[in-house]
C-alpha cells in the first residue's frame, strides 16, 4: 500500500487536497513524451497487481482518467472499485488529488510550476472469486485495469511505453512487441493507449507459445497458460483445429487486419472464464479441462472462432457509434446484432469448418439458439434492436424471468438473421453466391491493413449486400430487427436452409455438455423452467406449465415425487408421467414455507434438434463445408 507515501500525504494542508470546483480546466494536449507504465505481477498469488506510471505534464490543472467503457464489453465495466492505493508525487513530493464529483473514473490534480513529469503509484485489487484474473500459477493482464492517462484526448494519440515484471520462473506472451528483457522484467515497444488496452498479456508458471498454421502470413500463435502442466499441453486435436481455423479465415475474409495474431488462452478453475475480443489478439478463458475433456471441448468449441472473427467484425469493421475517441464517452449499441450477431454466425460456421465441431454439433448448437428464441415471449414487447440498444443495462444481468425480460438476444437472433441472409443470397443467385461473398466485400474492405478501425452505419450494410445481389435488403433486415413476436421470423428461415426445428425426448451431446458446464437442470422446453443442481429455479418460461402452477425464480425444489431433488429424479419423473394421468409432484421451499405443487404435464422430455426438411436445398450442409482442403 506504499505506506511511506501515505504518511507523507497526511502532512499536506487540507486545502492542497481539494481542487477548486469553480475553476474550468483547460483542454489538455497529448503528452510530449510517452507515458512510462510499469506493472508488477509478483504479488498476483495474493490477487494484487502493482502499477507505477511516469506521466509527462505541464504546470496547471490536469485530469487523469481510468478506462470506463472497455471496447468489447458494451457497457461501462472498467473496474474502478478495484483500483486503489493511489498516490501521486512531483519531484519526489506528494501531490494532492481529488476525484470528480460526477465521473468516478476521473482524478483532478494541480501541477506545480517547474514540474515536467509526475509519478503515479496504484494497486489493482483483483477479485478472489471466479471473476479473478490471477492465481498462484498464472495471470491475465487486461492493461485497462492498471493505467491512467490524460483526459479529453483521443487515446490513440497518447503514447505509452509499457513494461511488466513477472514472478520468478514465469513466462508470458501477447500481442505487444517486446524490446528488452532484464531479469523478470520485459519492456515493450512504445505504442498508444488504445493499442495497449487492446493487447492483453498472459503469463504463468506453465506457459507455452504454439505457432499455428506456420505456412500462413501474418503469423498466428496460441499463448497458453494453465494451472497445471498437463492442462497447458493442449490436445493435438485442439491445436490442429486452431491451425485449420487460421487457414479457413483467409478464403472467407480475404484479408487480415493485424501485424500478427495471438490467441491468449487460460485454462483454470480458479480464475474467470472469458471471451473478449481484441484487434491483434483475444482473451480466452476456459476450465482447467476445457479442452482435455471431450464434453467440455464441445461446449467450448466456438470460443476461439468467435473471438478470432471479431478481429474483422467488431474490431476492424465496427459500428460507428461503438467506436469512441476515448473510454469516457458512452458507446451506442444499436448495431450489436451485426457486431455480435454476425460474429456468432461466422464463429459457429468456422467452428464446424475448422473441425472444432462436427456437423451434428453445429446443428445442435443452432437448434439451441433457435429454441432459446422460440421460448422467449419477451419478444412481444422487446424487439432485437432494443436488446442491442439496452446491452449496457442487460449484459450480465439476472437470469430470473429472462424469457420475459430478454437478455443479450442480439447474439442468437443476429445469428439467425445472418443465416437467413446467407440462404436468401444462395436462393436468389441459384447457389452462385453466398454470404461468403459479402464477408469478403464488407469485412475485407481495403484488403490487408494494419490494425485500425473502419466504422460503418446501417446503410453500408445494405449497399454491400446489394453489391452481392440486388434485393430489398433494408426491408429484409428491418423486418427482423424491428418486428415483435410471437415467434421469430428467422426461425422460419431455417426451412430455407433445409432444416426444421423440432423437439424430441433425447438430449444432444452438445446440450448435455453445456448443462454440465453450467451446472444446470433443464426442463425449459417441457415443464417450462431451469434450475441449478441444488434445485433453485433460475428461470420460468411465461405461460408454461410451471408458470401456471405458480413456480418462479428463487423457489427451491426440495423433492420430486417423494424423492430428494436431483436432475435425474426430475428427468425420470417427466419421463414416467408421459402418456399417463399422473401428476409430477414437487415439494418446494418458498422462503421458510414448504409446499407441494403438482404439475399436470404428460408430453415427456423435450429438447431442440434440427431435422432435414426433405425437398428443399440442404444449404446448411453447404454452408459448413470447409473452404480449404
Image (spheres, rainbow, N blue to C red):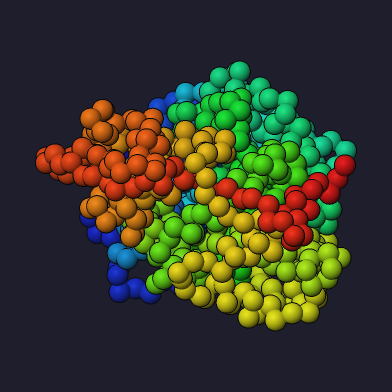
Q: Can residue 274 be seen in this view?
A: yes
Q: Quadrant of the C terminus?
A: top right
Q: Residue furthest left?
A: 593
* Residue nearer the viewer, 156 or 54: 156
User: Residue 335 at x, y = what percent?
Assistant: 57, 69
User: Residue 268 at x, y = what percent?
Assistant: 51, 28
* Residue nearer the viewer, 106 or 279: 279
* Residue nearer the viewer, 370 or 207: 370
> Vertically, is 186 above or below 78?
above
What residue is rendered at 75% in x and 56% in y?
Answer: 618
What residue is rendered at 21% in x and 37% in y?
Answer: 587
Q: Is residue 160 left or right of residue 248?
A: left
What residue is rendered at 34% in x and 59% in y?
Answer: 542
* Residue nearer the viewer, 375 or 539: 375
How many numbered discs, if any? 0
Q: In which quarter of the image is the N terminus?
A: top left
Q: Can residue 299 be seen in this view?
A: no
Q: In this view, does 339 lie to the left or right of 605?
A: right
User: Residue 38 at x, y = what percent?
Assistant: 54, 39
User: Residue 456 at x, y = what percent?
Assistant: 66, 72
What residue is rendered at 24% in x and 39% in y?
Answer: 586
Amino acid at each position: 500500500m506504499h505506506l511511506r507515501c501515505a504518511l507523507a500525504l497526511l502532512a499536506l494542508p487540507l486545502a492542497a487536497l481539494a481542487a477548486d470546483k469553480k475553476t474550468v480546466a483547460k483542454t489538455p494536449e497529448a503528452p510530449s513524451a510517452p507515458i512510462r507504465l510499469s506493472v508488477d505481477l509478483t504479488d498476483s498469488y495474493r490477487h494484487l497487481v502493482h502499477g507505477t506510471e511516469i506521466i509527462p505534464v505541464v504546470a496547471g490543472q490536469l485530469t487523469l482518467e481510468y478506462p470506463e467503457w472497455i471496447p468489447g464489453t458494451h457497457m461501462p465495466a472498467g473496474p474502478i472499485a478495484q483500483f486503489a492505493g493511489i498516490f501521486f508525487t512531483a519531484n519526489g513530493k506528494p501531490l494532492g488529488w481529488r476525484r470528480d464529483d460526477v465521473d468516478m473514473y476521473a482524478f483532478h490534480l494541480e501541477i506545480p510550476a517547474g514540474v515536467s513529469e509526475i509519478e503515479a503509484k496504484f494497486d489493482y485489487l483483483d477479485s478472489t472469486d471466479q471473476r479473478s484474473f490471477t492465481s498462484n500459477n498464472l495471470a491475465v493482464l487486461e492493461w485497462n485495469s492498471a493505467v491512467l492517462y490524460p483526459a479529453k484526448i483521443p487515446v490513440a494519440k497518447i503514447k505509452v511505453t509499457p513494461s511488466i515484471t513477472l514472478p520468478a520462473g514465469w513466462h508470458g506472451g501477447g500481442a505487444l512487441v517486446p524490446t528488452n528483457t532484464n531479469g523478470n522484467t520485459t519492456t515493450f515497444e512504445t505504442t498508444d493507449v488504445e493499442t495497449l488496452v487492446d493487447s492483453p498479456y498472459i503469463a504463468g508458471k506453465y506457459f507455452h507459445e504454439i505457432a499455428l498454421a506456420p505456412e500462413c502470413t501474418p503469423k498466428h500463435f496460441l499463448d497458453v497458460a494453465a494451472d497445471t502442466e498437463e492442462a497447458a499441453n493442449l490436445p493435438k486435436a485442439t491445436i490442429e483445429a486452431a491451425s485449420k481455423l487460421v487457414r479457413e479465415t483467409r478464403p472467407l475474409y480475404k484479408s487480415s487486419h493485424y501485424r500478427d495474431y495471438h490467441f491468449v488462452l487460460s485454462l483454470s478453475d480458479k480464475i474467470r472464464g472469458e471471451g473478449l475480443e481484441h484487434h491483434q489478439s483475444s482473451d480466452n478463458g476456459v476450465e482447467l479441462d476445457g479442452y482435455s475433456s471431450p464434453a467440455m471441448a464441445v461446449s467450448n468449441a466456438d470460443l476461439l472462432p468467435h473471438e478470432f472473427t471479431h478481429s474483422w467484425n467488431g474490431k476492424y469493421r465496427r459500428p460507428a457509434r461503438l467506436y469512441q475517441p476515448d473510454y469516457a464517452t458512452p458507446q451506442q449499441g444499436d448495431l450489436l446484432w451485426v457486431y455480435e450477431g454476425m460474429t456468432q454466425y461466422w464463429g459457429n460456421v468456422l467452428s464446424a469448418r475448422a473441425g472444432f465441431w462436427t456437423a451434428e454439433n453445429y446443428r445442435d448448437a443452432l437448434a439451441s439458439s433457435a429454441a432459446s428464441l422460440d421460448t422467449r415471449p419477451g419478444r412481444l414487447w422487446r424487439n432485437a434492436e432494443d436488446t442491442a440498444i439496452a446491452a449496457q443495462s442487460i449484459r450480465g444481468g439476472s437470469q430470473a424471468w429472462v424469457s420475459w425480460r430478454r437478455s443479450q438476444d442480439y447474439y442468437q437472433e443476429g445469428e439467425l438473421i445472418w443465416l437467413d441472409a446467407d440462404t436468401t443470397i444462395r436462393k436468389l443467385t441459384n447457389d452462385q453466391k453466398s454470404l461468403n461473398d459479402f464477408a469478403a466485400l464488407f469485412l475485407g474492405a481495403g484488403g490487408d491493413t494494419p490494425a485500425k478501425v473502419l466504422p460503418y452505419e446501417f446503410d453500408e450494410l445494405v449497399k454491400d449486400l446489394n453489391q452481392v445481389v440486388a434485393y430489398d435488403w433494408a426491408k429484409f433486415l428491418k423486418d427482423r430487427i424491428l418486428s415483435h413476436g410471437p415467434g421469430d421470423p428467422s426461425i422460419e428461415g431455417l426451412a430455407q436452409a433445409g432444416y426444421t426445428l423440432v423437439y424430441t425426448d433425447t438430449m444432444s451431446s452438445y446440450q448435455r455438455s453445456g448443462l454440465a458446464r453450467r451446472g444446470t437442470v433443464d426442463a425449459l422446453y417441457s415443464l417450462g423452467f431451469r434450475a441449478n443442481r441444488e434445485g433453485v429455479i433460475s428461470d420460468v418460461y411465461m405461460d408454461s406449465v410451471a408458470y401456471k402452477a405458480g413456480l418462479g425464480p428463487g423457489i427451491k425444489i426440495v423433492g420430486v415425487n417423494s424423492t430428494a431433488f436431483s436432475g435425474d429424479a426430475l428427468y425420470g419423473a417427466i419421463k414416467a408421467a408421459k402418456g399417463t394421468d399422473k401428476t409430477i409432484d414437487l415439494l418446494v421451499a418458498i422462503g421458510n414455507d414448504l409446499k407441494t405443487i403438482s404439475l399436470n404435464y404428460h408430453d415427456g422430455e423435450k429438447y431442440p434438434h434440427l431435422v432435414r426438411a426433405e425437398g428443399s436445398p440442404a444449404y446448411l450442409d453447404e454452408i459448413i463445408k470447409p473452404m480449404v482442403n
